[in-house]
Amino acid sequence: MDKRTQKERYDAGLKTRREVLGAEYVDKSIAAQDDFNRPFQELLNTYCWNDIWNRPGLSRKTRSMLNLAMLTALNRGPELRLHVTGALNNGLTKEEIREVFLQTAIYCGVPASVEAFRVAREVFKERGV
């Protein structure tokens, strides 16, 4: 179990979240927090981005591949867009992302992968990839 304080876990998670998703996106999310969603932002930074993303068992690159596949399977376009950016930030190549989406076509269905390819192409265009 992580013995660090809640603040240390939050700060470590926020650092990882900013590195993966981009500081601009994360800072905008943090700036938009209010009394209603603040507990959710704390959960994201502490539990998701620290306790899970900072575990030593998988690389960030592998975690990104898993996220791309799961978000494709769940048909979560806006989150997929965000995690295509994260995958690029974590060192995945355009070709590796393509392979993830080809794999999802078989196991999650072609329509899900059609959307994933569309989202990824938009991100690639925006990022000049």
Image (cartoon, rainbow, N blue to C red):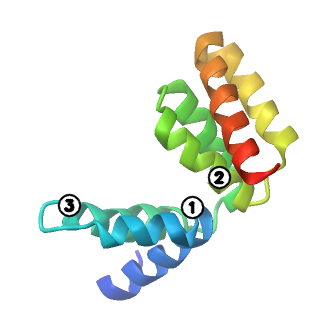
Q: Answer whether labels 1 and 2 touch (C-beta < 8 Å).
A: yes
> At numbered mark 2, what does the secondary structure look like: helix, strand or loop?
helix
- Residue at mark 1: 21
Q: Is residue 5 visible?
A: no
Q: Is residue 84 above or below residue 115?
A: below
- Residue at mark 3: 37
Residue 47, numbered label:
none
Is 41 left or right of 37, judged from the image as shown?
right
> x and y percent of residue 125 in the render?
75, 43
Question: If the image is split into quadrants, where does the N terminus sit?
Answer: bottom left
Work out whether mark 3 precedes mark 1 in sequence or the reverse, and give the earlier one: 1
> x and y percent of residue 102 in the render?
77, 23
Q: Residue at x 77, y 39 (%)?
A: 97
Residue 85, numbered label:
2
Amino acid at pointer 2: Thr
> At numbered mark 3, what does the secondary structure look like: helix, strand or loop?
loop
